[in-house]
Image: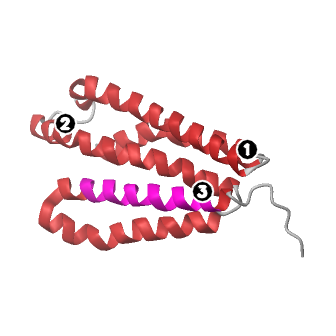
Amino acid sequence: MLTTLTGFIMVASLSVAQAAVPDVARAPDPGSARKAGRTAALLAVMGTLAGAGLLLGFGAHLLTLFSDDAAVRERVQGLLPLMLLASLLDAAQAVQGFGLTALKRSAASLSYFAIGYGLLVVAAVPVARTWGITGLWVAMAVANGLLVVLQGTGFHRHSAKVGQVLVG
């Protein structure tokens, strides 16, 4: 259920990230590219927060659409804050990843993804055995936080080259 709800929340951030690609790609200088990226990240996070607010406000009623089992709904409700944190971080990193694509640095974004989610894959089984589903959502939030740093640093580094004319 949490993964399905994450998908609904991510629609806004992914839409904003995709919509920002032309602005980043056409930016005449590093400052403009970074401003477009910051604006998109802010909008994506705001959209995610709006979805999170709806889930926190109406979650108990919404979860009845997914399960009749009160124990399952209670467990999901308890994990909702962790899922929302992971989604918020995912929204921020997604914008930076799409920004790297706009800068024609898709390979860098893919490399960061491989690092962040590769570490998550390696950790998933031991984390699940030790801390269960709660640990997995914490691990997802940590992986997405790492991706915020990696994608954000990569975007900042590659956007510094916007508008430069290469001679040679």
Q: Mark 2 belongs to which amino acid? A: Gln
For the point 64% across and 47% down, which residue is it?
34
- Type of residue at label 3? His
Which mark, by number, is residue 156?
Answer: 3
Our reading of the magenta stretch's main secondary structure is helix
As helix, strand or loop, the secondary structure at mark 1 comes to: helix
Whichever of callouts 2 and 3 sits on the residue coming sooner in the sequence is 2
- Tag 2's secondary structure? helix
Question: In the image, what residue occupies the spot 65% across and 41% down?
Answer: 36
As measured in the structure, the alpha-carbon distance from the residue carrying label 2 to the one carrying label 3 is 37 Å
Residue highlighted by disc 2: 77
**Occupied quadrant, residue 127:** bottom left
Q: Residues within 10 Å of mark 3 (few under 14, many from 20)?
A: some
Q: Which residue is mark 1?
A: 22
Q: Position of residue 124 (x, y in %)?
A: 27, 67
Categorize mark 2 by other alpha carbons within 10 Å: few (<14), some (14-19), many (20+). Answer: some
Q: Which type of secondary structure does the marked residue at label 3 adopt?
A: helix
How far from the left and from the top, in percent, is residue 159?
67, 56
Which label's residue is closer to the chain start, 3 or 1? 1
Looking at the image, residue 15 lies above or below residue 34: above
Give the magenta-colored segment's residue range.
Answer: 137-157
Residue 75 sits in quarter: top left
Where does the C terminus fall, quadrant-wise? bottom right
